[in-house]
């Protein structure tokens, strides 16, 4: 459920709408969990100024040494092939590592590093303060975001220190990798029959056990609540009283958790493609089946109008029949894609679902091109993948996707692992398959979280009201629009900005809608929410 900073990565060039590309390993001893009460406010005192923070004692603030740490800023590029670092350097950004506790119940114990970047405010007269950015995921690296978001912000960017942060165990922060031989742990489909589902159960159990053997001492601390606590250490180390925040998809959930743990420490808050706590689950797309099937039908109509280009059928029904033929063929025997890849019924649906995260023409064209190749493979004809498809398959089917899916799985399972019983998933799959033949078996399939240790802390419960700008599309196939409406009710002081008629996940700076971008920039510029909820229309 991530929103990426480019239209390319919004679907991971097909799959990073679920995961983000990350990275190595850490171990530690297990300690007692911090803040066992799910809705409890974090008790770390808020500094009033950088000077006041520096006077805090370890008795009154056990995190004082970390709040007062000196930040050592440096250039961002790690080498000649580091495109992200080079782009940050060209933009004039700095990078640093922030020291945070592995376990917040033991702040004097083992520490890890969280990587941040900063593009400093240039309009010092109107400076607001830091704006921390999160790209979603879970486990989406966000170090790059000051460069990409400054473009859509325009002159408003000059009022903020734009802060990118790779969450703990992600990207350049102390990383984690379970050493899995696939990148699809959470986006697999149950398959056509019970035998196929039993294979999924075995895979999920094996992945959980392998990650526990590799990183059992660390896994209890790979959580959203701890990432939110890291955010507050970053705030304090920057010498700031408050943070402004922009988060996409899962990043909206992270922002919600931060406001609960640290009330009063946010200034301007924008949550794009909103995911409320009650909809945050280890079955990522559960509840979004209808939206994805609707997106599939809409795409099929688009492809039918371009039958001369893609040859998938000249009516919506014919295009959908082509999709069904591909799925049936993969269930019978894995599709052969080039010499290197075999695409079975468990992984194939992720390619379709990954391509349905946006209704932009270029994204629809990408999916149509992929389906054209898959249709040939379903007819058992030789097929050579495009470079983009080869990258997707390498990520999904090999160890190239291990780090990304390890980190994503660890965060979600660490947050909300819920042992429902192996049979319950199959019953849900069978019920949903009738109405949602593509999305149902994927959205309701078993995951490694069924075999994960129970979370060290209960999931966060929101009992606050935060003035925030919530941004959502009515046809979002990832974090459905009803979730944004629910969040608006939960936070009466917030306002909801709706893009009507779009089937898009991630809007601000992603969709190219001038109305949405302008409304968000107006709020970031003035700090004043609109008097009432607003709506924008899709532009031709």
Image (cartoon, grey):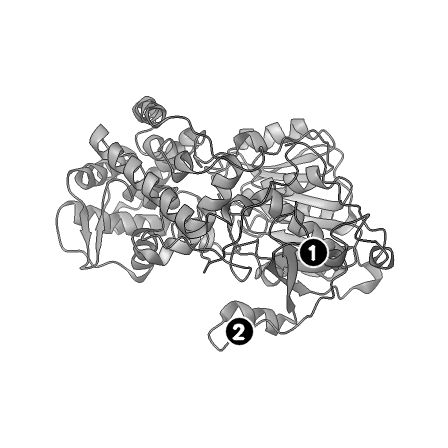
Is residue 504 visible in the rendered image? The answer is no
* Element under disc 2: loop
Mark 2 residue crowding within 10 angstroms, few (<14) / some (14–19) / many (20+): few
Q: Earlier in the sequence, mark 1 or mark 2?
A: 2
Question: Residue 250 or 476: which is nearer the viewer?
Answer: 250
Task: Answer left or right for 507 relative to 233.
Answer: left
| Residue 511 point in image, percent of width and height | 53, 49
* Element under disc 1: helix
Is residue 363 visible in the rendered image? The answer is yes
Rendered view: 498 above or below 425 = below
User: Given contact means CB atoms under 8 Å apart, are the residues at marks 1 and 2 in contact?
Assistant: no
Question: Residue 439 or 454: which is nearer the viewer?
Answer: 454
| Residue 33 point in image, percent of width and height | 60, 40
Indicate which disc residue 234 carries. Answer: 1
Task: Answer left or right for 429 relative to 125.
Answer: left
At x 25%, y 58%, the residue is 385
| Residue 359 point in image, percent of width and height | 44, 44
The answer to which quarter of the image holds residue 495 is: top right
Outermost residue on the bottom side: it is: 80
Task: Answer left or right for 503 relative to 261.
Answer: left
């Amino acid at each position: 459920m991530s929103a990426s900073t480019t239209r390319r990565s919004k679907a991971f060039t097909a799959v990073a709408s679920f995961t983000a590309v990350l990275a190595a390993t850490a171990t530690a001893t297990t300690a007692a969990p911090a803040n066992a009460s799910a809705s409890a406010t974090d008790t770390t005192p808020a500094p009033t100024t950088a000077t006041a923070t520096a006077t805090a004692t370890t008795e009154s603030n056990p995190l004082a040494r970390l709040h007062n740490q000196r930040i050592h800023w440096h250039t961002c590029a790690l080498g000649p092939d580091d495109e992200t670092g080079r782009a940050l350097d060209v933009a004039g950004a700095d990078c640093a590592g922030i020291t945070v506790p592995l376990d917040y119940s033991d702040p004097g114990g083992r520490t890890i590093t969280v990587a941040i970047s900063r593009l400093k405010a240039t309009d010092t007269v109107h400076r607001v303060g830091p704006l921390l950015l999160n790209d979603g995921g879970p486990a989406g690296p966000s170090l790059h975001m000051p460069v990409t978001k400054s473009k859509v912000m325009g002159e408003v960017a000059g009022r903020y220190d734009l802060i990118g942060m790779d969450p703990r165990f992600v990207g350049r922060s102390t990383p984690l990798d379970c050493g899995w031989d696939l990148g699809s742990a959470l986006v697999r489909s149950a398959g056509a029959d019970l035998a196929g589902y039993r294979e999924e159960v075995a895979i999920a159990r094996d992945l959980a056990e392998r990650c526990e053997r590799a990183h059992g001492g660390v896994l209890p601390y790979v959580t959203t609540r701890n990432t939110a606590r890291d955010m507050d250490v970053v705030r304090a180390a920057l010498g700031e009283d408050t943070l402004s925040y922009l988060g996409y998809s899962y990043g909206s959930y992270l922002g919600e958790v931060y406001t609960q743990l640290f009330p009063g420490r946010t200034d301007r808050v924008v949550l794009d493609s909103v995911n409320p706590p009650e909809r945050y689950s280890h079955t990522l797309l559960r509840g979004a089946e209808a939206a994805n099937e609707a997106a599939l039908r809409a795409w099929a109509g688009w492809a039918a109008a371009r039958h001369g280009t893609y040859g998938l059928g000249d009516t919506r029904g014919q295009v959908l029949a082509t999709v069904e033929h591909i799925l049936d063929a993969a269930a019978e025997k894995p599709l052969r894609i080039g010499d290197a890849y075999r695409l079975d019924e468990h992984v194939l649906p992720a390619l379709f679902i990954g391509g349905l995260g946006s209704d932009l023409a270029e994204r629809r064209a990408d999916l149509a091109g992929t389906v054209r190749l898959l249709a040939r493979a379903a007819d058992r004809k030789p097929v050579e993948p495009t470079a983009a498809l080869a990258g997707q398959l390498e990520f999904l089917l090999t160890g190239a996707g291990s780090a990304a899916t390890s980190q994503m799985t660890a965060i979600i399972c660490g947050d909300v692992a819920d042992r429902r019983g192996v049979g319950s998933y199959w019953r849900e799959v069978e019920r949903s398959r009738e109405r949602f033949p593509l999305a149902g078996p994927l959205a309701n399939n078993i995951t490694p979280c069924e075999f994960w240790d129970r979370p060290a802390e209960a999931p966060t419960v929101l009992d606050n009201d935060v003035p925030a700008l919530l941004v959502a599309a009515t046809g979002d196939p990832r974090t459905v629009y009803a979730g944004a409406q629910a969040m608006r009710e939960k936070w009466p002081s917030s306002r909801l900005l709706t893009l009507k008629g779009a089937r898009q996940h991630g809007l601000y700076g992603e969709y190219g809608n001038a109305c949405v971008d302008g409304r968000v920039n107006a709020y970031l510029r003035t700090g004043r929410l609109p008097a009432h909820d607003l709506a924008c229309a899709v532009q031709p």
